[in-house]
Image: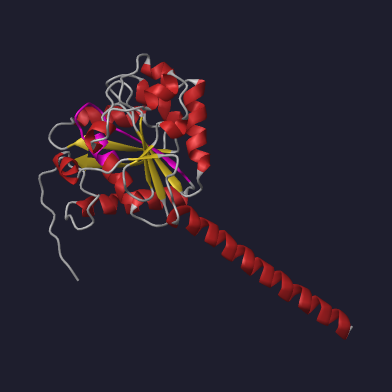
Amino acid sequence: MERIKEAISKARAKQSKQTSLSSRAKLGNQADETEKITYDQTKVVKLDTKHLEQNRIVTFDSEDPDSVAFDILRTQVLSKMEENNWKTIAITSPSPDCGKTVVSLNLALSIAKQTEKTALIADFDLRKPRVANYLGLPQDKSLYDFLEHDMELNQVLVNPGLPRLVVLPNTVPIRNAAETLTSRKVRSLVEDLKNRYESRIIIFDLPPLMAADDAIAFIPQVDCVLLVVASGETTPAEVKESRRQLQSCNLVGVVLNKATEQLKHYYY
């Protein structure tokens, strides 16, 4: 009996050690995925900080006081996404000029600053793509070439000189946008982006809800939605209609953009 107990004890100790090593290896792999990123196939483009400032992209600079609001938004959004094991989020607005692309980019940069996550922002506003212009990326190969000319995905992805951030830009407006966003090729692309890296958060910058049916046609492919409204511009009726259109979606929140109130900053 004592020998049996001793054998069981040794077996348990061995299993515990193997489990511990396996857990460490898993954590190590996750760390390697985010901390040892090299872009040998993805084009790397260094951004112009002045151009970013002019386009209100503030989260590239952790010391910029205006980046605090987006860091808070990042924390709230990631908390909700992690709680539900979501990896994809669409950002839209009721109408044009609410600042959805600015919010999308600042959120992506803020997420990329966290070592636990990588971020990819995809410009799926096919009628009026703006992500490349806001970042100051060259008018090079883009989503249009992937969809229309069968170019490889790694030929159109861009790393904007920042660790853990990848951009899928678009530089050419695409006709039949709603049909394209629901096509088999786009569905396959979304699945590929979602499953390629475990720690990646994917942000889709979509067209306004009331500009066309593009956004509402694509949204079923993503896990959740963030709605951006403009202070003093978006009407209550537009907000109500937008929420009606999104009632079957996982709406994680509404961002009030272009607010005039100034945040009070303090330091420890």
Q: Quadrant of the image for the C terminus?
A: bottom left
Q: Nearer the viewer, residue 230 or 100?
A: 100
Q: Residue 108 in the image: state x and y as whole percent.
A: 32, 44
Does residue 7 lie above or below 235 as drawn? below
Span colored in magenta: 86-104
Q: Kindly indicate the quadrant of the structure image that contains residue 126.
A: top left
Q: Residue furthest bottom?
A: 2
Q: Is residue 135 left or right of residue 22?
A: left
Is 152 colored magenta in this rendering? no
Does residue 36 lie above or below 246 as drawn? below
Q: Residue furthest front?
A: 40
Q: Nearer the viewer, residue 131 or 242?
A: 131
Q: Is residue 6 left or right of residue 26?
A: right
Q: Is residue 56 left or right of residue 150?
A: left
Q: Which residue shows up at 13% across the image and 54% down it?
A: 263
Q: Residue 30 in the image: state x and y as whole percent.
A: 51, 56
Residue 217 in view of the camera: no
Q: Residue 71 in the image: state x and y as whole percent.
A: 27, 53
Q: Residue furthest top?
A: 176
Does residue 64 lie above or below 240 as drawn? below
Q: Quadrant of the image for the N terminus?
A: bottom right
Residue 86 in view of the camera: yes
